[in-house]
Amino acid sequence: MAAQRDKETEAEFVPSYEKAQILQSQKYAADRDVLQALLEDGRTFSLKQIDELLRKFYNQEAK
């Protein structure tokens, strides 16, 4: 039973990263300035959350 719980926990685990780690990553190098403004200090973000923030930012209508 414990082994099954461990597998469930592993399946639910989503890595998250701090703002500084994200800004240093090669994956988001082209978006560093945008992410610097969008991401809050002291929080962690999953890659899915970051991609969603960028998608919303780039698809919003200019004011």
Image: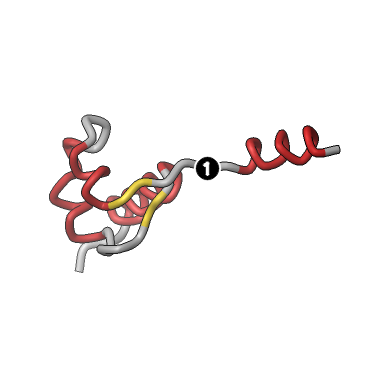
**Where is residue 47 shown, x and y percent of the image?**
41, 42
User: Picture quarter containing residue 4?
Assistant: top right
Q: Residue furthest top?
A: 26
Quadrant of the drawing holding the N terminus: top right
Residue at (37% x, 55% y) in the render: 44
- The local secondary structure at tag 1 comes to loop
In percent of width and height, residue 55 lies at 36, 48
Q: Could you tell me residue 38's position as x and y percent? A: 25, 60
Q: Quadrant of residue 9?
A: top right
Q: Residue at x 29, y 56 (%)?
A: 57
Left or right for 43, reference 9: left
Quadrant in the picture for the C terminus: bottom left
Residue depicted at 21% across the width and 63% down the height? 62
Residue placed most toward the observer, 16 or 50: 16
Position of residue 13 measured from the top left corner of the image (x, y, whole percent) = 57, 42
Can you say whether 4 is above or below 38 in the image? above
